[in-house]
Amino acid sequence: MQEFRYRQVRTVESAVRANGTYLAGGTTLVDLMKLNVLQPATVVDVNPLPLAQVEALPGGGLQIGAMVRNSDLANHPTVKQEYPVLSEALLSGASPQLRNMATTGGNLLQKTRCSYYRDTNYACNKREQGSGCSAMDGYNRMHAVLGGSADCVATHPSDMAVAMMALEATVHTEGPNGVRAIALRDFYVLPGTSPSIETVLQPGELITHVTLPAPPHGTRSHYLKLRDRAQYEFALASAAVVVQMHGKHLARVRIALGGVGTRPWRSPEAERALEGREATAGNFQKAAAAAMAGAKPLKYNAFKIELAKMALVRALETVTQMEHAG
Ligand code: SF4
């Protein structure tokens, strides 16, 4: 690990002024510093910031502080009751120990688990622009089938972000140029020719909180994750579904997929294929086909296309058969 300066800050303003790499739960940053993948000159410890509250918004909806730990968010009564997809996604991620440390802001910004990115013996455009992508001709079983480029096909690893994408979350930030509210669907950028740029955040910009809109009356939601083992494993494919039913018809549908895209993957194609239609197995399969129509498999990951379709169909079956609790 390279030498770095360490600063602890107590206000958002001093965090932004410190102009360094933010340290929250440390579950990604410290690992990657030990591996020499990330070598920040200054680490700014934001743990003392007063951003650890989950609060109801006056007009409905929820405000989640960037420092709220994943385990606290997953077990928050309002999240469990009104946003079960988020609670389920959080509880499907990592291990209890990691969830106790990992934060909302850090989870959104966690780095890919591409093994070539984490090993400095291999070429990786995300780590060092222009060095090449070892996954392209390497063992790419875990890599993306949606949103990849010739320069990078790494998946985004977050479960929480997939659920938040389907819940139409907004990310709130403060930076050298003031405060911003960024719709989560606009927050992540595709790798293109600059895979090291993963979000629209500017240098020094700090996530302060995330807001979720109030779920429309009668909304049901669910997160389904398929993976190689039942615990402590990243998704091969996952589906977050948020639906509002009118009788047997799907009035409003929001869908996001995990494990298959270079960013948490919202699917307007699947949503359009379902809205206004009856909740039937046939329509679910059409929506799943629409969601994965643009998929481009690599040598070892073509199976993810069918797996993602299955995850989405099963999640839709589960959520539409569910009795609404409210
Ligand atoms: Fe690096 Fe992306 Fe290629 Fe993985 S897929 S080796 S992160 S450039």
Image (cartoon, rainbow, N blue to C red):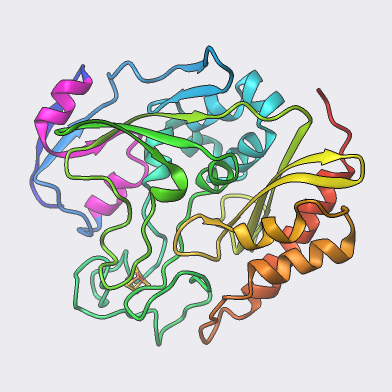
Q: Residue at x 56, y 45 (%)?
A: 93
Can residue 323 be seen here? The reply is yes
Is 138 displayed left or right of 302 in the figure?
Answer: left
Q: Is residue 32 magenta?
A: yes
On the image, the x and y values in percent for residue 50 come to 32, 15
Q: Which residues are magenta?
A: 12-34
Q: Residue at x 50, y 32 (%)?
A: 70
Seen as rendered, the residue at the extreme top is 58
Which picture quadrant has residue 127? bottom left
On the image, the x and y values in percent for residue 304 come to 63, 72
Is residue 260 positioned above or below 16 on the image? Answer: below
- Identify the image quadrant of the C terminus: top right
Is residue 66 positioned above or below 190 on the image? Answer: above
Q: Is residue 46 magenta?
A: no
Is 187 displayed left or right of 313 in the figure?
Answer: left
Q: Depth check: 61 or 122 in front?
A: 61
Q: Depth check: 212 or 115 in front?
A: 212
Q: Residue at x 86, y 39 (%)?
A: 246
Can residue 102 be seen here? The reply is no
Which picture quadrant has residue 218? top right
On the image, the x and y values in percent for residue 225 come to 66, 54
